[in-house]
Image (spheres, rainbow, N blue to C red):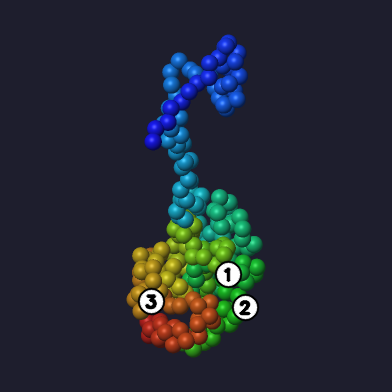
Amino acid sequence: MSTSTHLPDFQSPAEALAWLVQMGADEIVLEQAVDRFAESAKTVPPAAKPVAAPAQALATTIPMVDVSGLNSITEIITALNFLDNHPLKKSATKLSFFEGPEQARILIISDSPRKEEDRSGLVFADKARLLVSNMLTAIGLKLDDVALMNLLPWRVLGGRAPNAGEVTPTLPFVRRAVELLQPQAILAFSALPGQYLGGGDASIQRQRGKWIDVVGVPLLSTLHPEELLRTPTLKRQAWRDLQIFQEKLQ
């Protein structure tokens, strides 16, 4: 079926224009035809979404500090207090780096302060401190006779693991402290100290039972007191680690 279009006869241009308006025409004809379908096919590319920076890059780039001139733990703590561009320092309440006798033959290194340590400035506080004391007593040591130190002296908010950009700037201070203390052996709570100070495995289960050299001092890693408090069944594994450590001392 075919259809044909019949245009009315216009007596004047004004009548033609009025008819076009009535028919819904709202544009005049241009010299060149406009392809509206082609125009609608043109799409504006979406704005590129910002790519999230990796956790390591989020930390402020901190120049490495020459620590060779630091000759005591007090001087190391003073230098850490001046490390103002470290990202964790801004949100911390207190610096929690070292406590105990500098002449101790045993050094215990933890990963970083928790909420209780952040408030007190201690390396271990509350239930964790009591558990550490009991663990040391089990192998013939006293808490007051050992030195305690944190790999990171400031709390990491949110309970997450610290990233390399946060740990690396503090490593020279920790290594210098070990050089000055010259302990007989180091007991590390969590895999982090052995991983960053001696190239150990990032997994505490794969790092356990293996001695790691840290500037000439043997280091053995075990589970962190917080993890033992959260999962008491792991205490049997920690006890085996303590026995290995005790044999080394003897």
Which amino acid type is shown beneath numbered disc 1?
Arg
The first of marks 3 and 2 along the sequence is: 2
Residue 111, given in percent of the width and then of the height, sits at 49, 68
Q: Residue at x 58, y 51 (%)?
A: 84
Instruction: Measure how far apart labels 3 and 1 are at the Cα level.
Output: 22 Å
Q: Is residue 29 above or below residue 239?
A: above
Instruction: Measure how far apart labels 3 and 2 are at the Cα level.
Output: 26 Å
Q: Residues within 10 Å of mark 3 (few under 14, many from 20)?
A: some
List the residue tagged with mark 3. Answer: 205
The first of marks 1 and 2 along the sequence is: 1
- The answer to whether residue 222 is visible is yes
Which amino acid type is shown beneath numbered disc 3?
Gln
Residue 117, given in percent of the width and then of the height, sits at 60, 70
Element carrying mark 2: helix
Numbered badge on residue 114: 1
Q: Residues within 10 Å of mark 2 (few under 14, many from 20)?
A: few
Query: Which of the 4 quarters of the picture holds residue 32?
Result: top left
Q: Residue at x 48, y 71 (%)?
A: 109
Element carrying mark 1: loop
206 sits left or right of 42 in the view: left
List the residue tagged with mark 2. Answer: 126
Closer-to-camera residue (108/120): 120
30 sits left or right of 157 in the view: left
